Amino acid sequence: MSETVIPPGSIWLVGAGPGDPDLLTRKAEKLIRAASIIFYDALVGKGVLELAPRSARLVPVGKRSGRHSKDQCSINDMLVEAALAGERVVRLKGGDVGIFGRAAEEMDALAEHGIACHICPGITAASAAAASAGISLTLRGLARKLVFVTAHAKAGEELDLDWKALADPKATLAIYMGNAAAATISRQLIEAGLSADTPVLLIENASLPEERQFSTRLDLLALSAKSALGEGPALMLIGEAVRQRRVTSDSSLSFTLPPRKRASFCH
């Protein structure tokens, strides 16, 4: 059965979702159970890894901001070696494979060796965080655009983004790996024209039992990130859609932003 799901010598890049194993797709679970070897990122939830068969080898490859245990070239080489040895390979990545997962680099390396590679998408952290907070990431009349942004920069390098394009009051920004750059994000977006009182939601460990939420505003982002967030993976949601937050978790540290009057779209 396993060989029909993953033929020997082939690789699946699988999105493990935000951490909660109940948010895995059915296909992802099927692939994990069929693998003979699984290379997994640090952000993959423990509950997800527990789905692997006992016979499967679990190989951690790190890939967490500031704490990579393997460089990308080494990971590519490990995937190629396993596939050429006839393993049924799953490359397990947190969230969705195609969102800041460096999937293209791994696919290119595999293609150079003629290795079959397939993708199983997963739920990205922004979707899980929004669901937990009761937010719609898009909102008719207020949030017409959703932008995924990574705020990760190499050590010593300045965060180089198109701030003018990002400072769109009709957009929702989902910023990944932004903790260390919170002050820069706040300053640059305000300088580019986004209102200082734009609502922001910080979410740490989205979908997990230890999830934390903190509502703030753009001009207070740096202080809020420093005081409210710990060492877990965190996401920033910025924009008017955040003001519609309807759910407050037990782990919330938030204050409630006053709602702005909305026009009715029901006719």
Image (cartoon, rainbow, N blue to C red):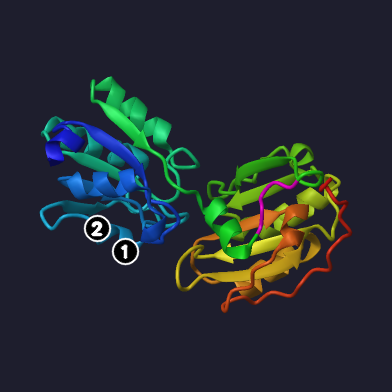
The residue closer to the viewer here, 217 or 134, is 134
- Residue at 42% from the left image edge and 52% from the top image edge: 17
Quarter of the picture holding the C terminus:
top right
For mark 1, give the secondary structure: helix
- Residue at 84% from the left image edge and 68% from the top image edge: 258
Q: Name the amino acid type tagged 1.
A: Gly
Q: CA distance from mark 2 to mark 1?
A: 7 Å
Identify whether 102 is placed above or below 241: above
- Checking the image for residue 47, the label placed there is 1
Identify whether 29 is placed above or below 80: below
Disc 2: which residue:
51
**The residue stretch that appears in magenta:** 135-139
Residue 114, image quadrant: top left
Q: Name the amino acid type tagged 2.
A: Leu
Identify whether 111 is placed above or below 251: above
Q: Is residue 76 rendered to the left or right of residue 163?
A: left
The residue closer to the viewer here, 2 or 74, is 2
The residue closer to the viewer here, 46 or 226, is 46
The residue closer to the viewer here, 163 or 217, is 217
Quarter of the picture holding the N terminus:
top left
Residue 208: x and y, percent? 45, 67
- Residue at 21% from the left image edge and 31% from the top image edge: 10
| C-beta proximity under 8 Å, tags 2 and 1 | yes
The answer to if 253 sits in the magenta stretch is no
Residue 64: x and y, percent? 43, 55
- Residue at 21% from the left image edge and 50% from the top image edge: 33
Residue 46: x and y, percent? 32, 64
Residue 12: x and y, percent? 28, 37
For mark 2, give the secondary structure: loop
